Structure formats: structure tokens, C-alpha cells
Amino acid sequence: MAILASGNGTNAQQISEYFAGNPRVEINVIIYNKKDAYVAKRAENLGIEAKYFNRHDFYESDNVLSFLQERQVDYVILAGFLLLVPENLLGAFPNRIVNIHPALLPKYGGKGMYGHHVHEAVVANHEQVTGITIHIVDNRYDCGTTLFQAKCKVEPTDSPDDVAAKIHLLEKEYFPRVIDSFIFDKPMPQSTAIAD
Ligand code: GAR
């Protein structure tokens, strides 16, 4: 498995820790596309190789694809990865690229809707409920088949940071388990966060 990330890397770390010691899953590499991304430091602490690729590597060459193929990667996990996945990767990993989005898609998805921008929009629109969506990646931002959603309440007094904290808890609880269920064809976890 390869994890792609752009920033802090809490999800990358949680996935790596969840699968550590599992003889059937290897996190082979954490790929990042922003030079100063803290995820590289997390990878180092975890003893996992971190590999930087720039826009050219993703969009104007087969550098990333060749690298993943050399490593015999089966699944690509987007954990806070903010670039649109290029066609060559989509073609090479059909239904094998999974993303997490910090909202209940199709709400608050699309270009520019990522990370804190999502939580700010959720608060600005006085949503009472938000959540996470884990989905298969296709060639559009935040579309593709949904594998799992979990919800949390938004209180009227919640700031975007408060919402972010709730979302990170959901991500921690569910993202690694949903990946596990997806790749080994097991039932998805039951979301107990809040009732429908
Ligand atoms: C996560 O909340 C993830 O859902 C979001 O970025 C954050 C990354 O945090 N992803 C997107 O917004 C994708 N559109 P992390 O770097 O600490 O894992």
C-alpha cells in the first residue's frame, strides 16, 4: 500500500500504526507533494520511507506511476492529499485508490473544498450535522463510489476548529478500519457516532 498526503499527516500515521505488525499489509511508502509537509517527519518517526514528488512528476511524466509499479503497490490511499489524481494512476489502479473527505459528500466537495475550508463552510451554513466520507477515487474531485460515511453533530457554538477536532476523531476511529474492510472484503464498521 502507498499513502499519499500533502500536509500534517495524522491520517497517514494512524493508518500506518493500525497496520503495523499485520503480515498481510505493508505500508511501503508515504508519498508527499509539498516539500515542507509534516507528514515526512511522521514517516521518518514511523520508520516508513517518505518520497517527495512534485507536480511535474504527477502530471507531466510517469515518475509516480513507475515508482508505484516498481514497489508493486496494490492500493493507493489518499490521506489529506490535495491534488487531483492523474489519469495514468487512475488507469493503473482501477477501484484501488481510496480517499477520505472531511464532510458528508456530495455536500462540501469539489475543487477548493478541503481541510479547513470545509469546516468553515459547514459552520457558515449553520449545519447541524457533518461527518466524513471515504470513497473510491475517480477523475473528479470528491466523487466516486462511497464506501463509508459517519456523522457528528455540529453545535451552534462550534467554531471551525471545533468541527475539525470532531472530524479528526471520526477519521481516527474509522479510516484505518474502513481500508481494512475494503481491501479484505469484510463488512464495513458500523458507525455509532450519531444515528441517522
Ligand atoms: C483530513 O481531515 C482529510 O479528511 C482532509 O484533509 C485532512 C488531512 O489531515 N482531506 C481533504 O480535505 C481532501 N479533500 P491530516 O494531514 O492530518 O491527515
Image (cartoon, rainbow, N blue to C red):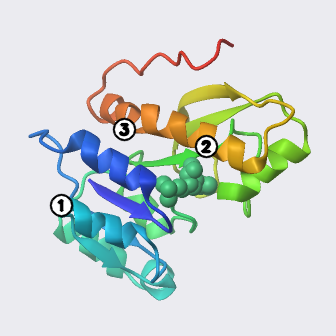
* Quadrant of the image occupied by residue 65: bottom left
Q: Secondary structure at mark 3?
A: helix
Disc 2 crowd, CA 10 A, few/some/many (<14, 14-19, 20+)? few
Q: Residue furthest right?
A: 125
Q: Which of the two residues, 166 or 157, is positioned nearer the viewer here? A: 157
Q: CA distance from mark 3 to mark 1?
A: 21 Å
Q: Amino acid at mark 2?
A: Ala
Q: Which residue is mark 2?
A: 165
The verdict on label 3 being within 8 Å of ligand 1 is no
Q: Residue at x 41, y 63 (%)?
A: 4
Q: Which of the two residues, 71 or 35, is positioned nearer the viewer here? A: 35
Q: Is residue 18 left or right of residue 193?
A: left
* Quadrant of the image occupied by residue 58: bottom left
**Can residue 137 be seen here?**
yes
Q: Residue furthest front?
A: 157
Q: Nearer the viewer, mark 2 or mark 1?
A: 2
Place of residue 141 in the rendered image (x, y in percent of width and height, measured from the top left)? 65, 56
Q: Secondary structure at mark 1?
A: loop
Place of residue 11 in the rendered image (x, y in percent of width and height, measured from the top left)? 43, 50
Q: Residue furthest top?
A: 195
Q: CA distance from mark 2 to mark 1?
A: 35 Å
Ligand 1 rendered quadrant: bottom right
